Image (cartoon, rainbow, N blue to C red):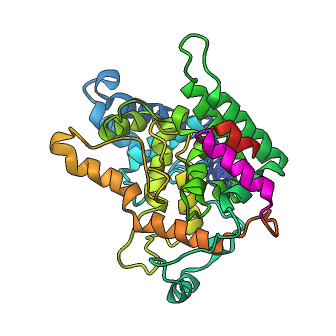
Amino acid sequence: YQLAGQLFNLSLLVSLLEVIVAGRDCLVAGDSCSSDETCSPRLRTLRQCVAGNGNMKLGPGARSQCASAVSALLSSPLNGCQCKRGMKKEKNCLSIYWTDVFLAGLNLVESYPYETVHRDYDYVRWPPSQLVSAFTFINLATLTYSTSDVNRCLDAAKACNVDDLCQKLRTEYVSVCIKPTAKSGLCNRSKCNKALRKFFDRVPADYTHELLFCPCTDTACAERRRQTIVPSCSYESPEKPNCLTQMRICKADYVCRSRLAQFQYDCAPSETSSTGCMQDNYGACLLAYTGLIGKCYNNPNYVDNSTSSVAPWCTCTNSGSQKDECDDFLGYFADNICLRNCKKMFFGYYTPRLRPKKVEKQEYLNEIKCRLKGWNIMCIMEH
């Protein structure tokens, strides 16, 4: 019996170490639990509890069975596991994560679905003390940029075009998003967003950020930036849907729900922080924002070509008694000091990968050509 107990403890330790080495991956934790004769039935019970509150599938004793499963699994490798953005079987991983969150009774402030991603941006890796010092010298409210000799959004497009992966996946999503279907003559929104997801998940952030957050001082540049995610296909409709309806649809989808939760965590505003962000992590906030594009049903984007304000394609009109909740959701985009400061700091830090010494005459002609075509997306891609 003593030997059996030691072997059991050793097996449990190996399983736990596997999860730790894997970065507490929920898929690994789930597989480990499923192969354990003690953990597996409790996980099945838990999933039944999550699916229907336990009442229908577990019978009269559902409440106590659910409580027992929760208590047992809180000490398992499942507790505290996370997923990686864009990973294979991401949806399966997230289904395990949300089961775990349901068990622990955690809220979004305490828990978030994705592992922290570190990128090679100096401004991302600044510790809070250096960020405060930076803010001492940079007035973000009045920060301006000299773009008289360069169109940074055009430079961002050029930088993408000289990178094989960026150019390939950008061309791919644009061609999908502008292609009309034979039946309706309209684009295929589902395929368009799938291609957008692929682009933003696989292309390095130093390219995608430059395309989305390049600073503009004129409407021509701003319209090029707004057209980056092909709004006419990816989200625009004759009438804006209600934001609360879109939120309910999003929360029913594991991936959309997770991307929104990550955005709300990484871009949480703070009135007491010198950076305006509760997490003091600009890079994580920008990554979380781009993670929403193509994943959620109301892609956030620039509201027009005259400002740098962003918002999802929805409205709070006719929200009734939930108007305040709806306004809070919209405000997380349109009136979020953290997100606003993230974009401004990126504008100030931004150094294009491909910046010509002078803007040649042909580039001016190309810009004029695109304006005359009403900023046709293919024109933007070609130039």
Image x and y of residue 142, in percent: 47, 78
- The span shown in magenta is 359-374
- Residue 378 shows in the view: yes
Taking 248 as reference, is 263 above or below it? Answer: below
Percent position of residue 313, x then y: 41, 41
Task: Answer with the quarter of the image where residue 345 lies.
Answer: bottom right
Residue 299 painted magenta: no
> Which residue is rendered at x = 59% and y = 42% of the image?
229
Of all residues shown, which one is farthest toward the left? 321
Look at 55% across and 21% down and name the residue there: 186
Q: Nearer the viewer, residue 353 or 198?
A: 353
Q: Name the main secondary structure of what is drawn in magenta.
A: helix
In the rendered view, would you say 268 is above or below 136?
A: above
Does residue 203 appear to the left or right of 129 in the view shown? right
Q: Residue at x 47, y 47 (%)?
A: 300
- Position of the N terminus, as image quadrant, is top right
